[in-house]
Image (spheres, rainbow, N blue to C red):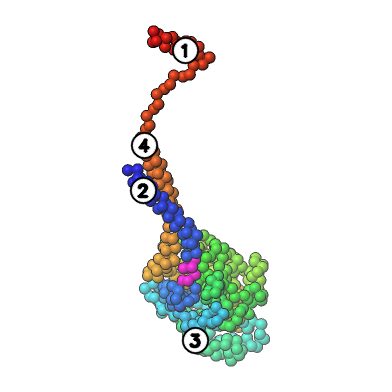
Amino acid sequence: MAAARRRLSVGLGLAGAACALLGVCLLLVGPVIIKEQVVKNVRIDPSSISFSMWKDIPVPFYMSVYLFEVLNPKETLQGAKPVLNQRGPYVYREFRYKTNITFHDNDTVSFLEYRQLFFQPDMSNGSEEEYIIVPNILMMGAAVMMENLPNFVKLLLSGALAGLKQEAFMNRTVREFLWGYEDPLLDTINAIVPGLIPFKGKFGLFVELNNSNSGLFTVYTGMKNISRVHMVDSWNGQKKVNYWRSSECNMINGTTGEMWPPFMSPTSLEFFSPDACRSMTLVYEQSGKFKGVPTYRFVAPKTLFANGTDYPPNEGFCPCMQSGIQNVSTCRLKAPMFISHPHFYNADPALVDAVEGLHPSKDQHALFLDVHPMTGIPMNCSIKLQLNQYIKRVSGIIQTGKIKPVVLPLLWFAESGSIEGAVLKQFYTNLVLIPSLLDYLQYIFLGLSVPLVISAAVLMARSQGTATEKSPRHPTMQSKPPPSSETTPLLHDTVTQSQDDAEA
């Protein structure tokens, strides 16, 4: 029995030592393994898991468009405050894919990304054939652009507008307003002021959006330096844009807005937006989870569209008006166009008060990105922007009436998407579940080693105690009388008397 206990204690001790060794090894090697797997699977390489996601985005993206109808066009023309009514959403399924993918020797890859949009009637609140009263963007834009030209030129335009029966507001279908309509005014304006609006054919806010690309991007692959993966090296061959008045504002920073370098910190992220003609910075708001996947949420700071007075670094984006809108005329053919958050969320209250019908709300109008920090891959996002036009009375052009200067919202849109289905399952298994299991195993092995070693020690101690109890005892020697001493005379005398009596 004792031998069996000893063998068991030795076995438990060895098992405990093995668990401790495995735990320490995983503690030291586990993070390295996880990092290597992440690096291997997020870089732009045909063998990586994320490459197919990067090349042909499998996530179902939807663009929801909301239009602002002007309810009182006649009164607005006479100087009244515009009254707006939000219409929509008109929802479009968005497909994105990359072509002309070319890898370079300097750890970069170039590509063109195209987008296709398909109307989704069942997800929309209204059809594309509905009519809506909106500003005559082409006419009102041309009027403001020509404000400082000689009066005879403006009178010439005004006469041409009258002949074409052009007015400040028009009644168009949703399809025409977004995707374009034939307008003889284009040719007329270009005949009067050549090159003022340098395009022909249909005019619409999204006429060049569908089946188009966002320019030639060159980004880093991360094969040599994973901290640079997806970061933009150049756009259309340029290292910076030339739309703005400062070097800082012209910088092309961050990624293309689809993925970011892995191992993110909860601080900020940057991306370059061709639609906004600039780089944007989002800031960390909070940590959370999306369908079991840990995420960092990034949102737009209040300074994103602040003017140069409220936020000096934005001075390069001026000339500015109130905070909360950005003048994009320099990259939109000098048309008086502004971008902002929907309903002027986070903007100067004066912009909201200048019209009726706006109700800014964080829940409905704030943009956000939920990104998996270990991989830099967005799990859930909703990017929201509003397009506005600055309109006013222009002397010499009678069609502008007595319109008071106002930044008038035209529409806002939300591009939203989230990883789901088979893509989410593959992502969760390879980049979340397996790394988490490795992380937990190290503590499980270390935890098991302690009771195993303690059990081995207890069994060993008990086996040794049992062996001691069963060992044979030696016979005891007969006691000899203690030797006499001067200190015990009475005892000595007694013994002597006993011996004398025995001899007698």
- Sequence-wise first label, 3 or 1: 3
Magenta highlight on residue 38: yes
Label 4 sits on what residue type? Ser
- Sequence-wise first label, 1 or 2: 2
- Dot 3: element: strand
Residue appearing at x 49%, y 68% in the figure: 36
Q: CA distance from mark 1 to mark 2?
A: 60 Å
Residue to which mark 2 is pinned: 8
The residue lying toward the viewer, choosing from 122 and 154, is: 122
Q: Are marks 4 and 2 in contact (CB under 8 Å)?
A: no
Category of crowding for the residue at label 1, using alpha-carbon neighbours closer than 10 angstroms: few (below 14), some (14–19), many (at least 20): few
Residue to which mark 1 is pinned: 491
Residue appearing at x 65%, y 88% in the figure: 152
- Sequence-wise first label, 3 or 4: 3
Residue to which mark 3 is pinned: 202
Q: CA distance from mark 4 to mark 2?
A: 22 Å
Q: CA distance from mark 3 to mark 4?
A: 108 Å
- Dot 2: element: helix
Category of crowding for the residue at label 3, using alpha-carbon neighbours closer than 10 angstroms: few (below 14), some (14–19), many (at least 20): some
Give the label, 4 or 2, closer to the camera. 4
Extent of the magenta region = 35-41
Q: Are marks 3 and 4 in contact (CB under 8 Å)?
A: no
- In-image side of 202 versus 421 (left or right): right
Q: Are marks 1 and 2 in contact (CB under 8 Å)?
A: no
- In-image side of 434 versus 205 (left or right): left
Q: CA distance from mark 3 to mark 2?
A: 87 Å
